[in-house]
Amino acid sequence: MKLWVSALLMAWFGVLSCVQAEFFTSIGHMTDLIYAEKELVQSLKEYILVEEAKLSKIKSWANKMEALTSKSAADAEGYLAHPVNAYKLVKRLNTDWPALEDLVLQDSAAGFIANLSVQRQFFPTDEDEIGAAKALMRLQDTYRLDPDTISRGELPGTKYQAVLSVDDCFGMGRSAYNEGDYYHTVLWMEQVLKQLDAGEEATTTKSQVLDYLSYAVFQLGDLHRALELTRRLLSLDPSHERAGGNLRYFEQLLEEEREKMLSNQTEAELATPEGIYERPVDYLPERDVYESLCRGEGVKLTPRRQKRLFCRYHHGNRAPQLLIAPFKEEDEWDSPHIVRYYDVMSDEEIERIKEIAKPKLARATVRDPKTGVLTVASYRVSKSSWLEEDDDPVVARVNRRMQHITGLTVKTAELLQVANYGVGGQYEPHFDFSRNDERHTFKHLGTGNRVATFLNYMSDVEAGGATVFPDLGAAIWPKKGTAVFWYNLLRSGEGDYRTRHAACPVLVGCKWVSNKWFHERGQEFLRPCGSTEVD
């Protein structure tokens, strides 16, 4: 194996070693896997060339020996009557055949396997595969996509064709099953059967699928269908021990159910139709509203409200830096006032900030409201990093710009946070400010609560990825180079609960954002307090 291939591979995986798995939480980090896999393919092709050269030598030797032995075996004594032939026979068996044995026993794969073994420690883990599978299911639910649509790769805004094979779909269903998610298990196992019935070749068998599917529908309470699927499984594999036990158990339960139905006819009439399963209710009360807004549905931008939204040039309260070159400002919402600014960051600045941030990206965390400790959460799927002004002049320049636009000081603001969303990346509805029962959240900073949020969109997103406000019915879509701004606190210092917002799952694309959270301290004369609690 060529040394330069190994060097390149180790260079790529040296970068990946800083990531510590969780690749699925950042598309930016997953791009490193693309290049690493490309180098692995190159390494594999070189191994194949070595193997082909070896097989070519062996084949040439075999052809040569076949021709020779055909002649010698036809008249062995006559052939050996020639002393040169006798010498060559002895030499071949004593020297040449052992040399061939050494050639055959040469392990051409040793170099490739050694490389692969070392690098596997930097590969995505089971956690990544489960996370990526959950991401597809999240997109499936949020954007109301059926498994067939996802399997055929028919997503809006895509420029590359991507399909899921039978085995891929089976992997999806199995991941859901292992997580106790029987609702998605059923959806994906049914898709597997559909593709198998269509004649698609696969290593996955119908018996395997029916095994998972029958138990999943049983867990969803559909005893009749579980019994039917188990019988189908046994017809394909009569020796399936678990299916045999399940069949007897299901039949017993069904008999008990029939006895109950006889004593209560109404219950039998109200039974849920077979094969119809509803998505389980989860922990998020505004789930339906949130996901509707992500799809662009239920936006409450009425004509009356729209008449109150305007565009203007913004000079930041006559900031000298903006008098000559004011920013274009557009109202996104009237109350609470949410505005968008255009051309806040140039393409060059965006690329530089991404370049600085990428090596520092780590799984985004949330602060536990009870303990104040930062921890990862399933409802926030992204990676983020925090940039200081000393990291690069562009960071200081962007910070000053946000200060000029908002009229607020950045001296007490948090560092510039850069975030890159992963597969189906999202941040479910949350508040940026700390509420009354979370007063100690920012105590360690000594700068008060988060008074305002300035959110920079550093990429366009082909589909999904909106910033939505469920209580308002507002949806704001990413536009590269623009930024949105809103106040999290009323002038009284009380939290504005209407600003509860979310980052919708990214359906197609790679979403990069950066944000600055301004804090109360230092803003006393820049944004004076109100006289009442609701100011």
Image (cartoon, helix red, strand yellow):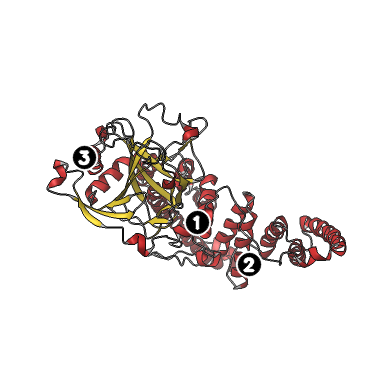
Amino acid residing under circle 1: Val
**Label 3 neighbour load within 10 Å: few <14, some 14-19, many 20+:** some
State the CA–CA distance, disc 1 to disc 3. Answer: 38 Å
**Lateral position of residue 520 relative to residue 300, left or right:** left
- Identify the residue at horizontal 50%, vertical 33% (top origin): 437
Q: Secondary structure at mark 3?
A: helix
**Lateral position of residue 7 relative to residue 222, left or right:** left
Pick the quarter of the image with the C terminus.
Answer: top left
Task: Specify the farthest residue to the left.
Answer: 324
**Label 2 neighbour load within 10 Å: few <14, some 14-19, many 20+:** many
Pick whichever of labels 2 and 1 is earlier in the sequence: 2
Name the quadrant containing residue 402.
Answer: top left
Query: Is residue 1 among what the camera can see?
Result: no
Q: Secondary structure at mark 2?
A: helix
- Identify the residue at horizontal 55%, vertical 50% (top origin): 285
Using the image, tell me which numbered label, if any, was put on residue 289: 1
- Mark 2 touches mark 1? (CB < 8 Å): no
Using the image, tell me which numbered label, if any, was put on residue 193: 2
Residue 310 image offset from top left, x and y in percent: 27, 57
State the CA–CA distance, disc 3 to disc 2. Answer: 57 Å
Circle 3 is placed at which residue position? 397
Q: Nearer the viewer, residue 347 or 233?
A: 347
* Of the two numbered discs 3 and 2 in the rendering, the one whose residue sits closer to the viewer: 3
Residue 151 image offset from top left, x and y in percent: 52, 65
Q: Nearer the viewer, residue 251 or 38?
A: 251
Query: Is residue 153 among what the camera can see?
Result: yes
- Identify the residue at horizontal 13%, vertical 46% (top origin): 323
Residue 398 image offset from top left, x and y in percent: 24, 41
